[in-house]
Image (cartoon, coloured by chain):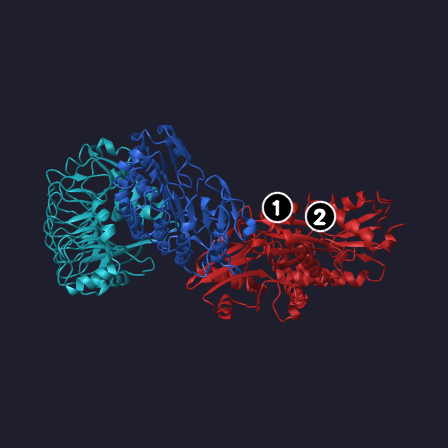
Chain colours: A blue, B red, C cyan
Amino acid sequence: MTYSEHIDQFHGVKVVNFNTADDWQGPEIAYRLSEEYDDDVTIGDRLTALLQQPQINRLTKLIIGGWTGSCEGENSKEVVAALAAAAPKLQGLKHLFFGEMVLEECEISWINQSDVSPLLRAFPNLQSLRIRGGAELSFSKVRHDNLRELAIETGGLSRELIREIFLCEFPALEHLELLLGESNYGFDGGVEDLQPLLSGRLFPKLKWLGLMNSEIVNEIAAVIVNSPITSRLETLDLSLGNLDGEGVQSLTGLTAYPQLKTLNISHHYASEQQIAALQQILKCEVIADDLQEPEDDWRPIVHAE
Amino acid sequence: MRNEDGHRLPEILIVGPENSPRVATFADTAHRCGAPRVQAVSYLDVIHGNCESPRPGTLIRLESPGGCPATIRAFLKAGIAAVETERRVPISSSEIDNLTCHRGEMLHPRQWFLGLREIMRDIDARWSQPDVHWMTTPESVISAFDKAECLARWSSAGLPIPRQYPAVSTYAELRRQIPERHARIFIKLRYGYSAMGAVALEWRDDRVRAITTVETAWANGRPRLFVTKRPQQLRREFEIAWLIDTLAMEQIIVEDWLPKAHWEGRPYDLRVIMIQGRVQHIVGRSSASPFTNLNLDARRIPREVVVQQLGDSYASFNTLCEQAAAVFPDAGMLGLDVLVGPHHKKFAILEANAFGDYLPGLLHEGRTTYEAELHSEYLAHPEFCR
Amino acid sequence: MDFSSPYNAGIMTSISAEQAYKVLKSGTAPADLTVSGVLDYSQKSERRLPPTFPDGLSVDVLDLSGQESVTLPSRLTCYELNLSRTSITTLPSDLQVTSRLDLTGCELLENLPSDFTVGTLLLRSCTSLTKLPENLDVWFLDLTGCWAFETWPESAQIRSGRLQLRGCTALRTLPPYLHRLAHLNIRDCPNLTSLPANLSVSGWVDLGHSGLTDETLLPQGLQGTQLRWAGINVDRRIAFHPEQIHVAEVLGERNAERRRVMLDRYGYGRFLQDSHAEILDRDVDPGGQRQLMRVKLEGDEDLVAMSCFCPSTGRQYMIRVPPVTPTCRAAAAWIAGFDDPDDYQPILET
């Protein structure tokens, strides 16, 4: 099963659904704005109400859940515009999760996004941006000097979107998480499409790299052990995909990168012996939870549909 | 014999399968509450006339017939004639004898229900002579078991229920009935219980998905349907169509899949124990899937939390539950499933369960559900109090 | 090559693809035009090519695939350039492509500019290409089906990624500067009999039907490398010692793909003999005697093949046919009209 629970913690604070002014508990916690299926109140109305709260300019953490018509397939364009327009009142915003919908509301690959660069332009102080849903998602070319963390959760991330992300400039980016997904749901690339990133030319401060939820993680593993980017990483996350013994064998090449602190390969199809051998040879922490049994020869990743 | 309040219980007769933990627990509770005589008879004994009629003044409790293969077979057999009356082909007696009756297996729920109806009416007719009290009358058990009947009663009482769609017999018919390009639909067996045969179905343009409690196992070229604790997601339309068609043969309820309120990140709904028409125990049931049944390992949410979550809406919720229970005046106890809409504003009555009170360990005002039911019998029947 | 600078400057001055189409169509596009997004002039797009592209054009993606005649401007800069199935013969020496240059099916392409750097270079079926340029720098290089290719540059960087040489039948060696690769495909390279001593491969090597048949010639750096035979993972014994494979082992292999490879390595003809194949039918045609034989494979369709002789050469062939084929005549008819040569190709010459 895919994302089935809403987060109740976001960047270290609790999350409260903001529905009316009664829900306001000050700017220190995270608020979630959303519009449920068949809701009486729109997300726009809730945003308007939120903006009227005292000290709203000190709010740092915001979560956008379902928006008007998201279940029916409406894309996020309007809510992107509304949020960007609210930027003058939200100058303190540092952490944004955009599209936090769960299984019951909308499958990850059914979420239709839009160009999210207007958010990056409107919020120059933003430090982290997490987006769920890759359909219709795009990044028109943008430079953002303060973004440290970018996470794109998809059931299938297109080559085009990978290119758009790589053509943006995020000089402060330290943490990049790409859930690549599978070809049935929009992933149409190959490991070669990651080459500009792996070559180390992008994102000079990157030290946390996740190439997750991928059906080509074995191939990624074979390339990443030869890649300049790896010599800068503290954490490499290849979890949620279909890594098997072949990929684990490739990852023994990570011995060449002593600065690496953590490798996460959870949700994998390798044997316990293969994992133990890897843990033996690597000095870093190796997280390898959630061993999967292949169904016949089919090895599904975590988030697809 | 009197209990601590000075009240006295009458003799109690429990009808339920042998070795049923429900029967044993209720008998135990009744003893502790001071019932002078507690007797349990099985449905099989009643059906075969192997027991005496209850003595005048006896309080009778009809317990869930589930969980016992012999009882399931007897109910299915009792339904043969009724199925034939409807000009349909029943599962024959010999086929019934060959059923393995695995735990969680869906076994011809419609024929089973018709059998339950026969047996309940038979019990009612046999024991109507002596001056007995039913905790819940046989007719009320029958009505509560028929989801369409429950929804019709609530609907005519003007109570909120999920929007209902006309009954369909195939997936294709369902898609014709609901031509919208996007829909969120919940499908249940009309005579199902314990999340048996539930499907949350959504389509948008050419995409369709179904989340279901049904797991299909094929043996000797024939499908067997089971309830699974890990709901499955189906994405291929032919699989979904097959499932709906298969369930529809047993008759299905088609209604809107309504969004639920969330607690700790998970959607939840409420199981409310109505005793003599009043709200007693409340337990929130939160689940990562659209199915919140406790037998699917949903997480329990304590009553205090639920009441706090409902806040100002609690009063209207309480009234709604009383109204929903009032359409079953002869049910001493009903387990109501109530959906709480997002932001705790709207409610919808989903189901009633005549045997929905087996919630060991759940206390309200210091009493278990069974204790509360027995306690209420004192209050409802002053003649018990000497 | 500085990757980001063209875009750095371009953020302020670039125009969208929609605007660019208009400007380019009018023929008034200024030099050093910078375009954000994709300019799709592929044959599939049915968009007319502009009279010229301005010198110094910079665009994220330029797609010219399938266009008959293509003239590239000088100082063209792209993230991706698609020239596949064009009649291009050579590229401008000042072309810059960051991520991916696709020249698939450019059958007239003879050479590439020297000192060319790109992430991914696709040269599939560039059948006029005999050599690569000096100082090529690339991560992913695909030369699949370049049967004329035989000369490596004296000096080049092919690193980190994947080298695909499938069907480079003229190729006799790999260059000594090949050092670290993720994947190497030398399938159907019959003249390639050894690998560079310093080569290490972190992923897989596909050596199906290559000239690399001597296990002792595998470099040290390939000790832990996964071997593949025609796309299927195999162990060293199957790859290098087919004579050690047993009939029972083939019949007992549950994975149909792996069994196909084992059969391939064993030799279908030898296998039918050794497995005591059942003779379903025999008759005589102009070439000589034909036999239709069947071996039962557990969990898979029966292996049915016809042995026959070529009337002109007298060579014996064994051809796999659908398992329901009842007679030699039916098999011959099926073979005459066969439509899926990958599945049922002539399989053994004895």
Along the viewing direction, whichever of C9 and B47 lies nearer the viewer: C9
Q: Which mark is residue B300?
A: 1
Residue bearing the label numbered 2: B22
Position above or below: B263 against A233: below
**Quadrant where the N terminus of chain C is found in the figure:** top left
Secondary structure beneath label 2: helix
Q: Quadrant of the rendered structure where residue C185 is?
A: top left
Residue C242 in view:
no
- Tell me residue C93's x, y (percent): 10, 48
- Tell me residue C155's x, y (percent): 12, 38
- Tell me residue A44's x, y (percent): 47, 57
Along the viewing direction, whichever of A200 and B146 lies nearer the viewer: A200
Task: Say few, some or many: other residues with alpha carbon within 10 Å of mark 2 (under 14 / 14 to 19 / 20 or more).
Answer: many
Residue B189 in view:
yes
Q: For this view, does A69 lie left or right of residue C7?
A: right
Q: Residue furthest right?
A: B386
Task: Say whether marks 2 and 1 touch (CB < 8 Å).
Answer: no
Amino acid carrying label 1: it is Arg
Task: Say few, some or many: other residues with alpha carbon within 10 Å of mark 1 (under 14 / 14 to 19 / 20 or more).
Answer: some
